[in-house]
Image (cartoon, helix red, strand yellow):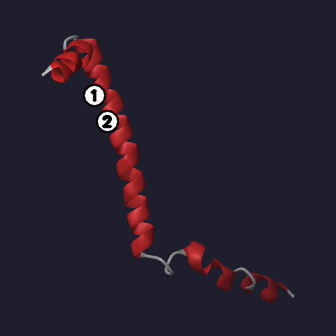
Amino acid sequence: MTLLNKVYQAVFRRTSTFALAIVVGAFFFERAFDQGGQTLFEQMNRGKLYKDVKHRFQGAGEEEEE
């Protein structure tokens, strides 16, 4: 119970620290969620994204110019 008491005294007792904890928590949650979603998307589409197939198209434009 003392751990909960210390958390209450440090964060939840004052409105300003509670609001700051919400803002900081939302920021880190957004970054983690965005990074996780991006990783999942790239994993599910491996081999289909431009970064995986760009070597096929890099030399195509040079041949037409000659």
- Give x and y (percent) for residue 51: 59, 72
- Which amino acid does the dot numbered 2 rest on? Ala
Instruction: Look at mark 1 in the image and give the residue it sits on.
Output: 22
Furthest residue toward front: 2
Where disc 1 sits, the SS reads helix
Residue 14, above or below 31: above
Kindly check if marks 2 and 1 are in contact, taking CB atoms under 8 A apart as contact: yes
Position of 2 with respect to 41 (left or right) is: left
- Which amino acid does the dot numbered 1 rest on? Ile
Residue 4 image label? none
**Which quadrant is home to the C terminus?**
bottom right
Residue located 22% across and 11% down the image: 14
Instruction: Look at mark 2 in the image and give the residue it sits on.
Output: 26
**Which quadrant is home to the N terminus?**
top left
Residue located 43% across and 71% down the image: 43
Where disc 2 sits, the SS reads helix
Q: CA distance from mark 2 to mark 1?
A: 6 Å
Residue located 35% across and 29% down the image: 24
Position of 41 with respect to 66 (left or right) is: left
Q: Quadrant of residue 65?
A: bottom right
Q: Quadrant of residue 11?
A: top left
Residue located 73% across and 86% down the image: 60
- Give x and y (percent) for residue 36: 38, 56
Residue 43, above or below 4: below
